[in-house]
Image (cartoon, rainbow, N blue to C red):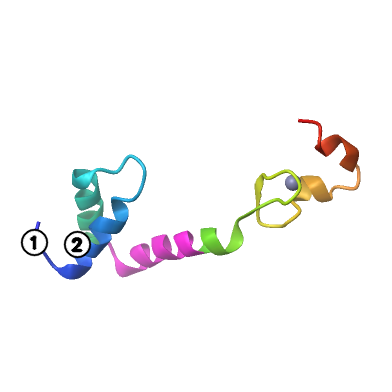
């Protein structure tokens, strides 16, 4: 498909997502094109926030916004129990 470069670029990026084939990628790109700019910005920002804020807990490897995660920081939790997997 030969189209605007920005559209092609978005389609290429969407194609990297699991389960997204060429038709879905195009449909999503056209959908975003029709939606208000604020909505597209919210999506883009959510992706950036995910990468900036969500990390793996260095103790239990769970996903968290604080490392160690709130569960591992809990004083009631005995650190000796964590390694039993
Ligand atoms: Zn943890």
- Find residue 8 and name its label: 2
Q: Quadrant of the N terminus?
A: bottom left
Horizontal side of 41 relative to 3 (left or right) equals right
Residue appearing at x 40%, y 64% in the figure: 44
Horizontal side of 47 relative to 67 (left or right) equals left
Q: Which residues are magenta?
A: 35-48
The location of residue 38, given as percent across then percent down, is 36, 68
Q: Are marks 2 and 1 in contact (CB under 8 Å)?
A: yes
Horizontal side of 67 relative to 32 (left or right) equals right
Residue 38 vertical placement versus 12 (above, below):
below
Task: State the residue in front, 48 or 15.
Answer: 15
Outermost residue on the left side: it is: 2
The location of residue 71, given as percent across then percent down, is 78, 45
Which secondary structure is most common in the magenta stretch?
A: helix
The location of residue 43, given as percent across then percent down, is 40, 60
Residue 69 vertical placement versus 35 (above, below):
above
Q: Quadrant of the C terminus?
A: top right
Q: For the residues marked 2 and 1, what is the alpha-carbon distance in whole angstroms? A: 8 Å
Task: State the residue in front, 45 or 78.
Answer: 78
Q: Secondary structure at mark 2?
A: helix
Task: State the residue in front, 33 or 78.
Answer: 78
Residue appearing at x 76%, y 53% in the figure: 68
The location of residue 84, given as percent across then percent down, is 81, 31
Q: Which residue is mark 1?
A: 2
Q: Neighbour class for label 2 at 10 Å: few (<14), some, many (≥20)?
A: some
Residue 3 lies in what quarter of the image? bottom left
């Amino acid at each position: 498909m030969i189209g605007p470069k920005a559209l092609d670029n978005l389609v290429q990026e969407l194609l990297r997502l699991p389960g997204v084939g060429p038709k879905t990628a195009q449909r999503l790109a056209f959908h975003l094109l029709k939606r208000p700019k604020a909505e597209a910005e919210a999506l883009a920002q959510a992706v950036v926030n995910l990468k900036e804020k969500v990390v793996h807990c260095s103790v239990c490897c769970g996903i968290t916004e604080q490392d160690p995660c709130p569960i591992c920081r809990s004083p009631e939790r005995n650190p000796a129990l964590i390694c039993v997997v």
